[in-house]
């Protein structure tokens, strides 16, 4: 009984993850039976062509048989959803945000965190999704933040350094309605993803202001994330703007390494990649898995061309870097730990990722809708990024 259940589960998982191999095996099996049937008709005196035609007529339409087999696997809806997520960084990112936040809520509940903590994280997720919905259409069309907005974000980070809440000599927070927000976690990821897609003088100045602010706060983790993201971008896309920003960011990161970081670990925020296992092994696995989910939206970037691949690579490095910083020191563990700043910042940065690659058929349909073709008109159709 157990072996039969295992065989069914294994087959369905394989049907979801390795559909192409199963389709090839099905095609080979159908062709084998078709050939045997055709040989039987040849022995009865029909020519090869007539035998194949008779066998196909008796056997039925092969494509219909294949589709019926796929539906019998019970994975067609899941497979369709899986393909959608795999090819769309934004949609995949939203799914990862919801899943990681949910795993964090489960951990905090199991660990006995104050009820306010999971409630605030859930509220932050809803706020982030609302911002995502508002920004996504405009971010997709503009490819990035307007240069003036990037510069303004850098100025806000610098203002936080000068006028924000100071704890143990570090000025990284502002307080709104009794809630502390770490502005670098909210703004910096979106700034970097947008900078990866579109750069100019003002946006570069905004990133440089952010680097100076992080050095002065000091915020070693986010300064390291900034330098790492720009280094990856410099390798992939060498231009003067990236080089200038990287030089300042690397210097700022070096400055933070010279200054001691004396902030203590905060329960349910810092070091939870380790302490969650003290609660229960499942709680620990939930935290680790939720943290690793954050970099997944970077994977589809390999199929979206150089420019859009840059944005996905920077996104992945930013959030992986924040997770590594949380593992190495007393820094907030994003989404799975208590703290709405990272939740809002993660979803906000998703808005500046590229959308899915539209098929040629979809591009053709949209071209017909938006610009009726005249006789003799030839459309120059290319793969489009939305």
Image: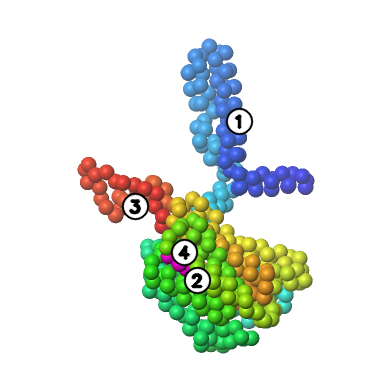
- Are circles 4 and 3 on residues that touch, CB within 8 Å? no
Q: Position of residue 1 (x, y in %)?
A: 78, 46
Q: Position of residue 135 (x, y in %)?
A: 42, 69
- Are circles 2 and 1 on residues that touch, CB within 8 Å? no
Regarding residue 356, the answer to whether it shows in the image is: no
Direction top: furthest residue: 45
Q: Which mark is residue 248?
A: 2
Q: Which residue is mark 3?
A: 366
Q: Nearer the viewer, mark 4 or mark 3?
A: 4
- Are circles 4 and 2 on residues that touch, CB within 8 Å? no
- Are circles 4 and 1 on residues that touch, CB within 8 Å? no
Q: Work out whether 192 lies above or below 26.
A: below
For disc 2, the neighbor class at 10 Å (few under 14, some 14 to 19, many from 20) is some
Please, what secondary structure does the residue beneath circle 1 have? helix
- Are circles 3 and 1 on residues that touch, CB within 8 Å? no
Give the magenta part as a residue range.
241-245
Query: Residue at 68% across / 70% down in the picture?
Result: 328
Viewer-closest of 111 and 275: 275
Q: Earlier in the sequence, mark 4 or mark 1?
A: 1
Q: Nearer the viewer, mark 2 or mark 1?
A: 2
Q: Which residue is mark 1?
A: 29
Q: Quadrant of residue 18?
A: top right
Q: CA distance from mark 3 to mark 1?
A: 39 Å
Q: Which mark is residue 243?
A: 4
Q: Earlier in the sequence, mark 3 or mark 1?
A: 1
Please, what secondary structure does the residue beneath circle 2 have? helix
Q: Earlier in the sequence, mark 2 or mark 1?
A: 1
Q: Earlier in the sequence, mark 4 or mark 3?
A: 4
């Amino acid at each position: 009984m157990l072996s039969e259940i295992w065989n069914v589960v294994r087959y369905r998982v394989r049907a979801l993850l390795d559909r192409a191999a199963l389709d090839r095996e099905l095609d080979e099996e159908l062709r084998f039976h078709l050939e045997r049937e055709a040989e039987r008709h040849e022995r009865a005196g029909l020519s090869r062509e007539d035998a194949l035609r008779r066998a196909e007529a008796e056997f039925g339409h092969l494509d219909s048989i294949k589709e019926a087999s796929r539906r019998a696997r019970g994975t067609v809806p899941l497979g369709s959803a899986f393909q959608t997520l795999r090819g769309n960084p934004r949609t995949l990112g939203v799914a990862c945000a919801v899943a990681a936040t949910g795993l964090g809520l489960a951990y905090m509940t199991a660990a006995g965190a104050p009820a306010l903590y999971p409630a605030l994280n859930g509220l932050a997720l809803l706020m982030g999704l609302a911002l995502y919905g508002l920004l996504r259409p405009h971010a997709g069309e503009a490819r990035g933040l307007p240069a003036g907005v990037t510069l303004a974000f850098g100025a806000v980070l610098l203002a936080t350094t000068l006028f924000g809440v100071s704890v143990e000599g570090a000025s990284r927070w502002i307080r709104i309605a009794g809630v502390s927000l770490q502005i670098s976690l909210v703004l910096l990821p979106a700034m970097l993803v947008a900078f990866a897609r579109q750069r100019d003088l003002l946006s570069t100045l905004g990133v440089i202001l952010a680097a100076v602010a992080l050095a002065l706060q000091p915020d070693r983790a986010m300064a390291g994330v900034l330098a790492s993201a720009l280094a990856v971008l410099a390798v992939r896309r060498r231009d003067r703007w990236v080089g200038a920003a990287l030089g300042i960011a690397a210097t700022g990161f070096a400055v933070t390494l010279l200054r001691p970081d004396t902030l203590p670990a905060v329960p349910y925020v810092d070091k939870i990649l380790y302490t969650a296992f003290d609660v229960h092994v499942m709680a620990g696995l939930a935290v680790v898995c939720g943290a690793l989910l954050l970099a997944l939206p970077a994977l589809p970037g390999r199929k979206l061309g150089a420019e859009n691949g840059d944005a996905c690579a920077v996104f992945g490095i930013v959030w992986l870097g924040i997770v590594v910083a949380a593992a190495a020191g007393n820094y907030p563990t994003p989404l799975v730990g208590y703290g709405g700043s990272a939740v809002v910042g993660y979803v906000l940065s998703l808005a500046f990722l590229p959308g899915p690659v539209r098929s040629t058929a979809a591009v053709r349909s949209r071209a017909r809708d938006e610009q009726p073709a005249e006789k003799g008109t030839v459309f120059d159709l290319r793969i489009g990024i939305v």
